[in-house]
Image (cartoon, rainbow, N blue to C red):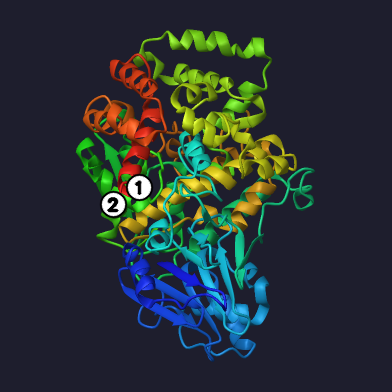
Amino acid sequence: MCGICGIATTSAGPSIPAEILTRMCREIIHRGPDDEGLFVAEHIGLGNRRLSIIDIEGGHQPLSNEDGSIWIAYNGEAYNFLEVRDELIGRGHVFKTRTDTETMVHAYEEWGLDFVHRFRGMFAFALWEKKTRRLLLVRDRIGVKPLYYTQLPDGTLVFGSELKAILAHPDVKREIEPTALDLFLTLEYVPAPYSIFKNIYKLPAGHYLTYDEGRTAVHKYWDIEPNRPPDESLKGRSLPSLMDELYALLKESVKLRLISDVPLGAFLSGGIDSSTIVGLMRELGASPLRTFSIGFKDSSYNELQYARRIAKRFETRHEEFILEPQALELTEKLFRHLDEPLADFSIFPTYLISKMARAHVKVILSGDGGDEIFAGYEHYQAQRLSRLPAVARGAKAAGFITSRLPPGEQKKGAWNKLRRFTQAFDNNKDLRHLRWMMFLSDRLKENLYSDDLKTRLGGIRSIGQHEPFGPIYERLKSFDRTTGELYLDLKTYLADDIMVKVDRMSMAASLEAREPLLDHKLVEFAFRLPGKLKLHGLTTKWIFKKTMERLLPKENIYRRKEGFSIPIKHWLRAELKDLMEDYLSEKRIASGGLFQYAAIRKMMDDHSSGKENYSHQLWALLVFELWRENYLKK
């Protein structure tokens, strides 16, 4: 695992100063503390920070083919590289290392742009071909590994694994992209291709970018195939045979991710996703099998009892950590690693469990992705509610009733779920289930956004009018309803929230995270299945749960889903209240010119008194102001 960065210029462009490239590399040293490498030639500069996992001694980067005509700076793991490497050796290619990085170079030599289809894994890399003076930037299918880029007025392309590497270039300007800010406050993350900065972009998952003499073009190389009409390969298949294939794919995916020249372990929450990974690691003979869990003193957020059951069942060497509010002294450190606003509460436990694991291992397997490919979230259930006639679902009536329950009661069970579901009906029905993933309605925006921000946005617009949602909504017609919802989350929330969180927080601890549930072969299989096998009635992850009954205790499979979160709403009323009052003060808000303080003041007062729960909205605003303090006030 590594961090990469680079600069490419046109034939008429300036030479590339090695000191700028070095500065860019040093900004991402946490991604690769083991080694640094630079390659600077005419019109190209590549930089790499390396976390050594495979061929520790011989894998120095950037790396080239035999004659130095093709160079690569690579971040990631291609888990099937040995198989591809053997095929290339059989075709006459000569290798000087045992790395997947060099395998990429020779694969490009052999198959051209089609080479990326040969690999299974997570990766983001830059490949320079000297003869054609073409730069190729590639990001993996799911978007596990990040890649940002910008083009300067003179045609120069600047890129990096993280925004901070690009911002280290002296000619890159720091200016907020208002659409990205609007999307962040709505969704709590910034979806690709946007970044929070104007003219700096994320390369979308499953895409590659070509740069030829100042001309850039972005191309899609992978996508999910429609499952409407039903996939022919499933015709006549029995449920047991589908479950057998699913189990085999899960096992194969875990096996591929056990390849390592350094110690590895697994995150363990005790839910079905992480428990499946640990159980299959044990079945595959992983030894020693180390597992890591995090808990809270607040019992309503604590899952340690479930993790302990799995650790005992599979005889792991288990470590635990209790997260307390004072751990949020890490706030500024963590936002430095994020580069752009991300309001996902679970960045804190993700970082702390990564830090704990890094003291023992260098590679971790995690259960991320199971909810997005097998329908594990409550908002998939909410779609069933939305299909009822308006009178039956009683949106206004239910909202009226639940809004009048005491805050303590609103938190409990079905009432809390009902209130969350009915609040979503404030949003446009055409947004499908995305409305259950939105935290700032158009009504709230009208009160919150300043006149200047509204003008820069061209007015308050429906989120469905923003890129990238338009093209995604067009493709939803190709899937059954449940699978269409999964596709939307796969392309947005998973890639731009979950994967960002896991990548940045694990890399902040110099830990490589691998996600077996996001192997593209497994993902493709899951998306071919009809939605009713994933969301069966109101049972989420149905076929996954039925399949894993052969491996896991039912108490872990069918327990209530808690999620990897923190009690932020309580902390904003207590331990974090002073920080919130400081960063959301009238003076700071006025200096930004983006928001109306009266709307923020009302939310803070209503939240502090317990009258309302504005934890999502206030936390997002606090995150943004912390980010603005660190990245714009310089």
Residue 632 - label: 1
- Residue 486 % position (x, y): 61, 41
Label located before the other in sequence (1 or 2): 2
Percent x, y for residue 210? 62, 68
**Please, what is the three-letter code of the amino acid marked with disc 2?**
His
Q: Nearer the viewer, mark 1 or mark 2?
A: 1
Evaluate whether residue 314 shows in this view: no
- Disc 1 is placed on an element classified as loop
Residue 53 placement (x, y as % from top left): 38, 71
In the drawing, does residue 197 fall left or right of residue 373?
left
**Which is nearer the eye, 414 or 556?**
414
Cα separation between marks 1 and 2: 42 Å
Q: Say if residue 200 shows up in the picture.
A: yes
Of 561 and 433, nearer the camera is: 433
User: How many marks can you see?
Assistant: 2
Residue at figure coordinates x 34%, y 70% from the top left: 262
* Residue bearing mark 2: 318
> Regarding mark 2 in the picture, which secondary structure is present there?
strand
Of the pair 201 and 245, the residue shown nearer to us: 201
- Say if 211 sits above or below 589 in the image: below
Q: Is residue 382 above or below residue 463?
A: above
Q: Residue at x 47, y 55 (%)?
A: 515
The answer to whether marks 1 and 2 mark residues whose Cβ atoms lie closer than 8 Å is: no
The percent coordinates of residue 207 (x first, y second) are 61, 60
Tag 1: residue type?
Leu
Image vertical order of residue 116 relative to residue 548, above or below: below
Of 546 and 87, the residue lying toward us: 87
